[in-house]
Image: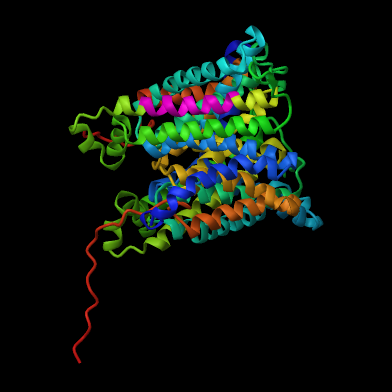
Amino acid sequence: MITDLKPLSKLWLPLMLLAIFAFPFVDTNPYHVDVMVTTGIFMLLALGLNVIVGYSGILNLGFAALFAFGAYTYALVNIHWHVPFWIGLWISGFATALFGILLACPALRLSGDYIAIVTLGAGEIVRIALNNLDTITGGPNGLLGIDHPGLWFPKYQFGVKSEPYYFLVFVLVLGVIFFLKRLESSRLGRAWCALREDELAACFMGVSPVWAKLSAFAIGGFIAGLAGCVFAAKQGTVSPDSFDFVVSVMVLAMVVLGGIGNIGGVLLGALTLSLLPEFLRGFESYRMLLFGLAMILMMLFRPQGIAGFVRPKEEYRPKKITSPK
Amino acid sequence: MSELDIFLQQVVNGLTIGMIYALIALGYTMVYGIVQLINFAHGEIFVVGAYLGLLAYSLLSRIPQLASGGALILLPPVLIFSMGFTALLGMTIERFAYRPLRDAPRLAPLTTAIGVSFLLQNAIMIIAGPQDRSFPYLMTVKKVSSGPVTITNLQILIAVLSLGLMFGLHGFIKNTKTGKAMRALADDRQAASLMGINVNRVISIAFLIGSGLAGAGGVMFGMYYNTINFHDGYMVGLKAFTAAVLGGIGNIPGAMVGGVLMGVLEGLGAGYLSSAWKNVFAFFILILILLFRPSGLLGARVVKKV
């Protein structure tokens, strides 16, 4: 399918980049740009979860915990030590990667969906802890007064406008895509692929499943940390409400709906599920009902995801026997 | 009240809610055992059950002869109404949202389940309103125990009913032909279908029974807490699912043990820590148990080849 588009693909990428760059200039409605910033943050999250679910094949139902950890890390280091955004971004990323490894440690002993439950439990624990550790996290009210990012040269403050965040988020998304593309063909990427296809065979070839799974959680966590940091910096506040189970579930749905393990698909899934509620706004209280219905229908229509492909299964199919006349 | 009495009181309260968790956990575990699907919509079916119970009650209580009869007269029709409709709902959901994806990648039906969950939750909100609805006790609640530990007749009713349903299910799975077919499907679907088992029919029945039990759980949950909200399915569903995993997912006695244990853990957490931290306590214990028994308390040990 992709090979048919070969001549077009050279043109496709610059056109896409141009469209992304031009969007806030063409569509000056600040609300639309704001929605696109949220979409971009969800794209980052979906890309991060895709590393865990798509590359290493571990079902993670508590991804919002990593997102929350990134957001609160930046909020705390910024409020207490006035760490600027550009350094906070790295701190959030690496701290969340460590947190991801910590989460993965119990998970490694378990198989299949039991890991999913541990991640789910961890997600709930983080959310409840954020709600109740009043002295550190500010409880249900969250933390206020987080600095917006700014540039030193040229001197520019991001403030509360959406446009600068739009560019920031998409630079990050593009950077993460580039990184993941490189990763896919690296030793680690090939190890993930091998483990997913046949764990037993991969182990015999010297792939360490422990190392591969820990790296997946670390890298997925790093990306979620970046997303969390940008989210906190844009909002200026963080509160536990933004990180409940529904977020984990939505990001998972984006990954599955787009096509597990496929970067383009995951981006498309994030775009679809972030924008769909906006398009359904006219239906008011029926909005989320229709959203659920749309999710079901899309999945029924394309079980492998929007951009997923099905590896043809080799199977013995007897030919139809036509009786001789 | 002495230390021991406080402890016992928390255990009694935990046991009651644990029975309800166990009923819901059975639906998760049956479905998981047979089709390896985490049925996210199950928590919503439980809430639908609670609201249907409320609907049946408000219809029945218009008849004065019935309304004065108390729980013994009112409860059976309310339960049957709620269980019947949730059972049909569960079966319908399976038919349209899960069956077409049975041979799709494993996470595809999980995503439709999430979609169904959104759909049901919002349907309840639109039909019944977003506010809390008060649910009747259906009976006069009295303390029946002597001594400092309070046990009410409502708690006993819930325990008896839940245990009855659970043992009924256990007997059904153990002794009937359909039950045997279910166990066969859980073992090896392809081999079972080669033996002439109608796979679609058996899966439908599993959804039918599991959803019916969730409906019964919903009615009892409403009676116990007196208030229901369209949001309740999320937390209760999460805990029931956790309970199913705790017991060993796919394992029916495991779901019962897991549910009761989850309720007791939560009760103790609420009693000794604070109600805000009770869920943290429950989930923390869950993770600890899974660390030492990676396939749940009663789950079959999966031997790893590597």
Q: Position of residue B95 (x, y in %)?
A: 49, 61
Q: Residue A219 in magenta?
A: yes
Please tell me whether residue B182 is drawn above or below residue A122 in the rendered image.
Answer: below
Residue B228: image quadrant is top right
Q: In this view, does A66 lie to the left or right of A282?
A: left
Residue A168: image quadrant is top right
Please tell me whether residue A40 is drawn above or below residue A278 in the rendered image.
Answer: above
Residue at x 59% of width, y 45% of height: A19
Magenta segment, prevailing SS (helix, strand or loop): helix
Q: Please name whichever residue, B19 or A98, is drawn nearer the observer in this view of the structure.
A: A98
Residue B103 seen in the current view: yes
Quarter that holds the C terminus of chain B: top left
Q: Please name whichever residue, B287 or B226, is drawn nearer the observer in this view of the structure.
A: B287
Looking at the picture, the colour scheme in use is rainbow
Q: Where is residue A129 in the image (x, y as percent from the top left)?
A: 60, 20
Q: Residue B45 in magenta?
A: no
The magenta stretch spans which residues? A214-229
Q: Please name whichever residue, B256 or A161, is drawn nearer the observer in this view of the structure.
A: A161
Residue at x 49% of width, y 58% of height: A300
Q: In this view, does A235 lie to the left or right of A52?
A: right
Residue at x 41% of width, y 49% of height: B171
